[in-house]
């Protein structure tokens, strides 16, 4: 690992500080220049030209400042995000916000921040079950949403045995459609909560 890689976060933080100072200084000097131009009786065209130039320079510096700030945050997040991190609290709202940011800025997706705050499969099942128990969902809606949730989980280790059982039953022989339907009915009875 090179010196630059080890100190990248400090370099980016310094660049954020420098561009922030330059942006504020440019706006301040530009404002003084415009006020001096108005006070000395310079033409309005000259004053507006100076103001436009100052705004262009300030906008460029602010854009650079934001780019350096995002790079700094990404670098710090990458350094912090390791296997030794404690589990982060689940937050659907934060996960959705981070997911939108990752879609807007694809380079952020490699850090998987939205997944770190995403609801676990168990939490999703508990919420779905609670909605069913509270009569927010009909039995058909509950079963459909549970099937969709189980199919979404099929790529993870969570509840893999249930999904494997659904896939394995038709391979056992006999009428494939009937066997799969019987297995789903049995599985549904085991996962369906009692209405209270």
Image (cartoon, helix red, strand yellow):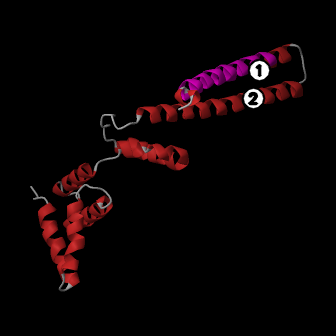
Total numbered labels = 2
Magenta region: which residues? 8-33
Please tell me whether mark 2 sits on a helix, a strand or a loop.
Answer: helix
Q: Which residue is mark 2?
A: 57
The image shows residue 71, relative to residue 177, as above or below, that is: above
The image shows residue 135, relative to residue 143, as above or below, that is: above
> What percent of the width, then of the height, locates residue 170?
22, 78
Residue 88, numbered circle: none
Question: Is most of the magenta stretch helix, strand or loop?
Answer: helix
* Few, some or many residues within 10 Å of mark 1 (<14, 14–19, 20+): many
Q: Is residue 189 left or right of residue 155?
A: left
Residue that appears at 61% across and 34% down: 67
The answer to whether any part of residue 138 appears in the image is no
Q: Which residue is mark 1?
A: 30
Q: Is residue 26 left or right of residue 82?
A: right
Please tell me whether mark 1 sits on a helix, a strand or a loop.
Answer: helix
Between label 1 and label 2, give the one nearer the viewer: 2
The image shows residue 177, relative to residue 120, as above or below, that is: below
> What percent of the width, then of the height, locates residue 136?
23, 57
Is label 1 in contact with label 2 (beta carbons under 8 Å)? yes
> Residue 34 versus residue 88: which sits nearer the camera?
88
> Residue 61 versus residue 106: which sits nearer the camera?
106
On whether residue 47 falls in the magenta region, the answer is no
The answer to whether any part of residue 22 appears in the image is yes
* Few, some or many residues within 10 Å of mark 2 (<14, 14–19, 20+): some
Residue that appears at 75% across and 29% down: 57
The answer for how far apart the CA atoms under marks 1 and 2 are is 10 Å
> What percent of the width, then of the height, locates residue 196?
9, 55
Q: Quadrant of residue 90?
A: top left
Q: Which is nearer the N-term, disc 1 or disc 2?
A: 1
On whether residue 30 falls in the magenta region, the answer is yes
């Amino acid at each position: 690992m090179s010196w630059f890689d080890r100190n990248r976060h400090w370099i980016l933080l310094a660049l954020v500080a420098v561009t922030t100072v330059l942006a504020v200084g440019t706006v301040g000097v530009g404002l003084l220049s415009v006020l001096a131009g108005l006070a000395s009786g310079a033409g309005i065209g000259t004053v507006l030209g100076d103001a436009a130039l100052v705004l262009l320079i300030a906008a460029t510096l602010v854009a650079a400042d934001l780019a350096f700030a995002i790079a700094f945050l990404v670098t710090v997040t990458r350094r912090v995000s390791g296997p030794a991190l404690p589990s982060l609290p689940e937050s659907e709202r934060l996960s959705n916000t981070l997911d939108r940011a990752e879609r807007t800025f694809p380079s952020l997706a490699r850090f998987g921040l939205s997944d770190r705050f995403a609801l676990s499969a168990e939490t999703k099942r508990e919420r779905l079950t609670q909605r069913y128990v509270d009569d927010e969902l009909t039995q058909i809606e509950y079963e459909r949403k549970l099937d969709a949730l189980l199919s979404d989980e099929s790529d993870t280790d969570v509840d893999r045995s249930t999904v494997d059982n659904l896939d394995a039953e038709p391979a056992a022989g006999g009428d494939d459609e009937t066997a799969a339907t019987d297995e789903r009915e049995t599985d549904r009875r085991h996962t369906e909560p009692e209405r209270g």
